[in-house]
Image (spheres, helix red, strand yellow):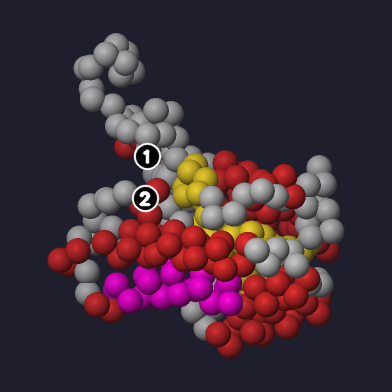
Amino acid sequence: MNRLAGKTAIITGGARGMGAATCRLFVEQGAKVAIADMLEVEGRALAAELGNAARFYPHDVTSEESWAALMRNVEKDLGAVDVLVNNAGVLLFKTLLDTSLADYERILKVNLVGEFLGIKAVAPGMVERGRGSIINLSSVDGMKGANGLAAYASSKWGVRGLTKVAAMELGHRGVRVNSVHPGGVDTAMGNPGQRSREQVNQGFTNIALQRVGESSEVAAATLFLASDESSYMVGAEIVVDGGMTAGHYYVGMPGAPGM
């Protein structure tokens, strides 16, 4: 129950979904957590739920000034930052030809530039202390193509490359940088219509586990990378996707469900 004892973590996009699940799990495992998000109502409610081990900080991941203020406040309130979870992200379902330049730049700015700025903000202190773990949330769509996700997939492929470069430049200085690649997860962002779990699962019948993922399942992978248990992992990609990148079933062929 103390896999993160003595560690301070910043979790961006921490007010709901995968971020909130990660905040809860980190606190449960002994960490002090900075919930960084633009969603103040949800963020403050989560901080109140988690008690003295968590604090909420209004934060815009696309702003260097916001990152600087966040670092000052977290270090003052909770201590030096040991872990950064670059979780904040936005999703856009549009074909490439229907995606405007403004749409494209907005998605890249949050999903990719936001993670770049996060690394820039926390890495100097981690390097000075000779230790730290940065976990970048990418996606299965950073490992394959997908229709309707031109901007989102571009940003998540970018996160994958950024993680590799940061791992090489920071690893020998004591800072481990890795990425987590969720598949479909039942969150407000991925399921904005709040369809039932049974309805959502209908879209996952052609993958191995035949269901959508849960935020807690992604949080568990993030916890492992944040903990000292992953001390020899840097530049790694952990896929949490129910088998989405393993392949899709050919219905009616041997080995498919029901055959």
Quarter of the image where one finds residue 70:
bottom right
Q: Residue at x 55, y 85 (%)?
A: 64
Q: Quadrant of the C terminus?
A: top left
**Location of mark 1 (residue):** 245
Query: Observer-nearest residue: 197 or 133?
Result: 133
Give the side of residue 15 with respect to residue 248, left or right.
Answer: right
- Please indicate, yes or no, whether residue 48 appears anywhere in the rendered image: no
Write the residue at 62% across / 49% down: 233
Q: Residues within 10 Å of mark 2 (few under 14, many from 20)?
A: some
Which amino acid does the dot numbered 2 rest on? Met
Residue 143 has which mark?
2
Horizontal and vertical percent position of residue 81: 74, 69
Q: Is residue 151 left or right of residue 6?
A: left
Contact (Cβ within 8 Å) of mark 2 with mark 1: yes
* Real-space Cα separation, disc 2 to disc 1, in angstroms: 8 Å
Three-letter amino acid code at the position of disc 1: Thr
**Region rendered in magenta:** 103-120
Residue drawn at point x = 33 percent, y = 76 percent: 105
Q: Nearer the viewer, residue 56 or 237?
A: 237
SS assignment for the magenta stretch, majority? helix
Rendered view: 150 above or below 113: above
On the image, the x and y values in percent for residue 204 come to: 35, 35
Does 125 lie within the magenta span?
no
Q: Was residue 105 drawn as part of the magenta stretch in this picture?
A: yes
> How many residues crowd mark 1 within 10 Å: few (<14), some (14–19), many (20+)?
some
Return the residue nearer the eye: 195 or 224: 224
Q: Residue furthest front?
A: 172
